[in-house]
């Protein structure tokens, strides 16, 4: 009997790179399931009511897997909120680039994407705000994010009003007030399930922003 073996039929050993890629894919999938489960649960309950066990049960994963990705719930929402915050920041850049005068359509074009971000990620951003109330580290991170937005909007307003490259103190405070109004209003409107339509929210914010900018510019 021949002992010839067709080497072509032998299973090819999996390369280290392939194994690592499969592990990474598995980790990415489990992380995505955890984030998705958390996103579902924050629509049903407040941040203080959330538990790691409940999130992992919703994700269909073992509790221990949670700690392969996140330190705690605050870390989960801080990481998950990063994408939404960066998306929101990019929508604000549009206002900075709009220098065609203080017309409602210019302001509306910047506000519409911001409202859309809260429409999609409102519960997640509300949970992050709730987490900041009891976690100094998250609160410090939120403060840095707010300063970043305040500086951007202050520069945008200075551009629109043709004030100059350095926003005066009054414009900086107007930017801060408008940003806090946006945040509070949009979290209230979209922090759980939408209380109003996105179109109504855009109309309300556009009217306020245009009135403030025109009064300042007048």
Image (cartoon, rainbow, N blue to C red):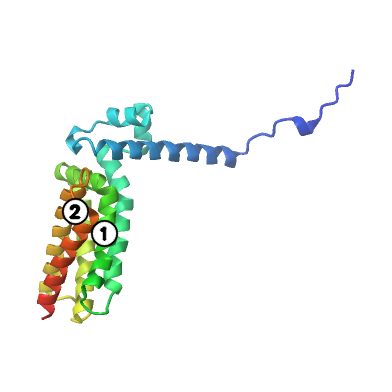
Q: Nearer the viewer, residue 183 or 69?
A: 183
Expressed as whole percent of the image width and height from the top left, the position of residue 203 reads: 19, 62
Residue at image position (28%, 67%) is 109
The quarter of the picture where the C terminus appears is bottom left
Q: Nearer the viewer, residue 11 or 98?
A: 98
Taking 5 as reference, is 169 above or below it?
A: below
The image quadrant of residue 28 is: top left
Residue at image position (37%, 38%) is 69
The quarter of the picture where the N terminus appears is top right
Expressed as whole percent of the image width and height from the top left, the position of residue 106 reads: 25, 72
Q: Secondary structure at mark 1?
A: helix
Q: On the picture, is 159 further left or further right than 34? A: left
Q: Secondary structure at mark 2?
A: helix
Which residue is disc 2 drawn over? 186
Q: On the picture, is 111 further left or further right than 7? A: left
Residue at image position (28%, 46%) is 78
Residue at image position (14%, 73%) is 213
The disc placed on residue 191 is none
Which residue is disc 1 drawn over? 114
Expressed as whole percent of the image width and height from the top left, the position of residue 61 reads: 38, 28
Taking 210 as reference, is 75 above or below it?
A: above
């Amino acid at each position: 009997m021949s002992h010839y073996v067709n080497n072509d039929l032998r299973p090819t050993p999996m390369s280290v790179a392939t194994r690592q890629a499969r592990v990474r894919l598995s980790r990415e999938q489990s992380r995505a399931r955890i984030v998705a489960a958390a996103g579902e649960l924050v629509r049903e309950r407040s941040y203080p009511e959330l538990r790691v066990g409940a999130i992992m049960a919703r994700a269909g994963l073992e509790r221990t897997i949670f700690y392969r990705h996140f330190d705690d719930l605050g870390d989960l929402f801080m990481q998950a909120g990063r994408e939404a915050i960066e998306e929101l920041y990019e929508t604000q850049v549009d206002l900075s680039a709009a220098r065609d005068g203080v017309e409602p359509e210019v302001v509306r074009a910047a506000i519409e994407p911001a409202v859309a971000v809260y429409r999609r990620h409102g519960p997640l951003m509300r949970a992050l705000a709730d987490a900041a109330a009891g976690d100094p580290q998250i609160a410090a991170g939120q403060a840095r994010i707010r300063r970043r937005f305040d500086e951007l909007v202050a520069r945008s307003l200075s551009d629109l009003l043709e004030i100059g490259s350095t926003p005066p103190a009054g414009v900086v405070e107007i930017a801060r007030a408008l940003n806090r109004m946006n945040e509070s209003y949009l979290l209230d409107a979209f922090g759980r399930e939408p209380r109003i339509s996105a179109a109504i929210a855009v109309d309300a914010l556009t009217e306020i922003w245009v009135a403030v900018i025109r009064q300042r510019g007048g």
